[in-house]
Amino acid sequence: MFKVFIFIIFFFSFSFSYASFDTLNFKNVSYFIRTGFHNGTVWAHSPNANYAAGALVNGIEIELIRKRNDSLDMHYNKNGFVSGYGINYFIVNNPVIKNNFNVFYTLESTIFKFKKADIFLKACAGLNFINNPYDSVYNLSNLSYSSAVNAFLSLGLLSNYFLKNGNSIGLKIQFNHFSNGGIKDPNLGVNFITSAISYQFKINEKPKLKLNIKRRLNIIEGNENLQFTAFATYKTSTVNTENFYLLNGFSLSYNKPFGIKKTHSLCVGAEWLEDRAMTELLIYSGAQRLSNQRVGIIVGHEFLFHQFTWGQHLGYYIFKDIPYLNNLYHRHSVSYKLNLHWSIGISLLAGNQKAQFTDFRLTYKLFKKGKHSI
């Protein structure tokens, strides 16, 4: 999983270029419907998941896509980007991993633009719904997921060839993943790679609308800031998968936006957390005198994409009594800006390519006086 998220960093760093704010106070959007048919296979990323290796996957997908035709589009990518919502259904030829249904948000950034074709980098995130989860009495064979509802992630490449009528046909390849983010064990997750053929047709174009330019600029971060974050979640223990235990913590980081339009940010900071689920494991192992608390230092990169911030952080524990965890870990987060100062979000912490927990967070950003405009 770590290599997958490194790809995310490359994905946005390579594809996002910047243009001017000349008409940022106007909005112009076109809408499309895209249908697709998937074919692929399951990749067993762990020896414990070999029971699903090579299973055939077939699926059908439909998406509602919107294309920005104004300066916000040009601000983040001079070649354009599209976003939208979709649903898909995958049939898996395996007795343990069952068929699954996903709803998701998609973001596609143009990396190559030709006269009759575009090539996009595509990222999706949403919810996965599936039956046959792990059960300590009735289903011990499924170590891949123990929740009927999971997080769904997908990364890939999409190529569209435009027809004379304005519609297009496309080819894409995607890496797909779902798991519960470490909230409930066992949770190896399911990874499957698919290729697909799609057809896209235009359904509507909204007229140009005048927007509140002051409101739009107020969510764009221009200069350095301090971020105070409180986070918490409930998760099971590896020795007790029936009960949920509180995990909570807080972090402090210094963030420095950079780039032509300040749409990237570098950050450095520290975080503390207390994991009560780990207490159960320590007691089970006869090591109850050890602390369930951890302190880590973090460095990372964030994409400041309009109201969303997507972050990737590398951490190192400077205090950790727990012998079952490595000192090195990585954290990946998505947050939504309520206004210039407050954000809400979700974050995944993982180590050794395995999710340890997913938390929910509230962040306050403190700017230097007069240092919050572009």
Image (cartoon, grey):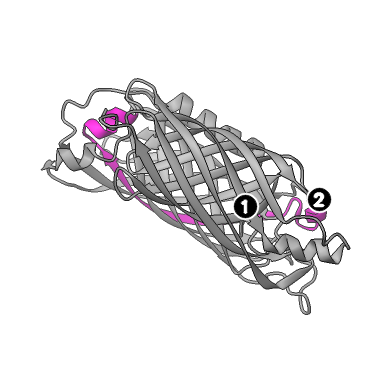
User: Does residue 317 appear in this view?
Assistant: yes
Of all residues shown, which one is farthest toward the right? 286
Q: Which mark is residue 100?
A: none
Identify whether 80 is placed above or below 210: above
Residue 57 appears in view: no
- Looking at this view, is 56 or 246 the one in front? 246
Residue at 32%, 50% (x, y): give it.
338
Image vertical order of residue 238 relative to residue 261, above or below: below
- Measuring from the top left, give residue 337's x and y in whole percent: 34, 47
**Residue 192 position within the rendered picture, expressed as x and y whole percent measured from the top left:** 64, 49
Residue 156: x, y in percent? 53, 39
Residue 65: in magenta span: yes
Point out residue 88 in the picture as x, y percentages from the top left corner: 49, 58
Farthest bottom residue in view: 137
Residue 308 position (above or below residue 222): below
Helix, strand, or loop for circle 2? Answer: loop
For label 2, the residue is 324
Q: Is residue 132 left or right of residue 80?
A: right
**Disc 2 crowd, CA 10 A, few/some/many (<14, 14-19, 20+):** few
Quarter occupied by the C terminus:
top left
Marking on residue 273:
1
Q: Quadrant of the N terminus?
A: top right
Magenta region, residue range: 48-76
Three-letter residue code for mark 1 = Leu
Residue 217 is left or right of residue 211, and the answer is right
Q: Secondary structure at mark 1?
A: strand
Circle 1 crowding by C-alpha within 10 Å: few under 14, some 14–19, many from 20? some
Q: CA distance from mark 1 to mark 2?
A: 16 Å
The type of residue carrying mark 2 is Tyr
